[in-house]
Image (tube, rainbow, N blue to C red):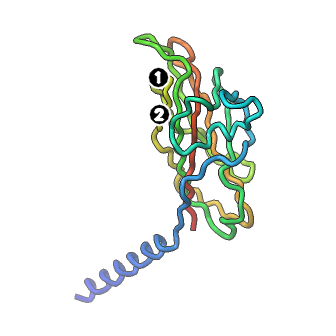
Amino acid sequence: MKVLKNFLAILLACALIFTAQDVFAFTTSPLRPIGNGAYTNFAGAGGWWFMADYTRVDEITCNGTYDYVYATSTGMKESFVVTSTTAFASSTITKIEIVPCASRIETGGMFAKLSKMNVFYRINGVDYSSTSGDYWLPNTSTPQLLATSTYANINYYVTSTANIEVGVEYQQCGFFGCAGVRLSNISAIIYYE
């Protein structure tokens, strides 16, 4: 009986710890680009010639039929500042989720060219993630909302300002050649405690 009581006490303590962690964890709403980041290899399309790249991908909806950024050569990267505030001061960033909306530039039938795109994040000017996602873009020039890429267990303590960028890289071509990448919008959700 004593062993059972001790087990229940330990179980209750663990439950309280996990509940406390959930209570003190915070999540931002989806953050959209507010500035250009360190990487600016993509070209801008649509809009006015003087539009900043970040204004081409900051829409709420995944449409991108008029303004977007694009790349035609593998290895090209583009990043965007999604937050640069003291909101995270004295906090620990624990997870970042990135959701891109993209398509190919070229499309076709059975022997269509393919393209693979990845995403990444940066904090305070440093690349903290490798690219991930492995998004083989759909065989259409109409942009589509792609799956969420999650970076968990980050554990980045912010002393004063968190300048966070998210970005994309044109990673790979298909067997029949490169179809290009068209990024229509991108957003990030940041978890911190």
Does residue 106 sit above or below 165 in this rendering?
above
Q: Position of residue 161 (x, y in %)?
A: 73, 62
In this rendering, position of residue 175 left or right of residue 72: left
Q: Quadrant of the C terminus?
A: bottom right
Q: Residue at x 50, y 31 (%)?
A: 143
Does residue 87 sit above or below 45 in this rendering?
below
Q: Position of residue 95 (x, y in %)?
A: 55, 56
Q: Observer-nearest residue: 66 or 30?
A: 66
Q: Quadrant of the N terminus?
A: bottom left
Q: Which residue is mark 2?
A: 144
Which residue ends up furthest to the front in the rendered image? 48
Q: Which residue is mark 1?
A: 140
In this rendering, position of residue 104 left or right of residue 159: left
Q: Which mark is residue 14?
A: none
In this rendering, position of residue 179 left or right of residue 110: right
Q: Position of residue 30 (x, y in %)?
A: 54, 53
Q: Quadrant of residue 43?
A: top right
Does residue 186 sit above or below 102 in this rendering?
below
Q: Position of residue 6 (x, y in %)?
A: 32, 85
**Are dots 2 and 1 in contact, CB under 8 Å?**
yes
Which residue ends up furthest to the right in the rendered image? 50
Tell me which amino acid carries mark 2.
Gln
Count the labels in the image: 2
Dot 2 falls on a residue whose secondary structure is: strand
Q: How many residues crowd mark 1 within 10 Å: few (<14), some (14–19), many (20+)?
A: some
Q: CA distance from mark 2 to mark 1?
A: 9 Å
Q: Residue at x 72, y 48 (%)?
A: 126
Q: How many residues crowd mark 2 within 10 Å: few (<14), some (14–19), many (20+)?
A: many
Dot 1 falls on a residue whose secondary structure is: loop
Does residue 14 sit above or below 39 in this rendering?
below
Tell me which amino acid carries mark 1.
Thr
Q: Residue at x 61, y 48 (%)?
A: 32
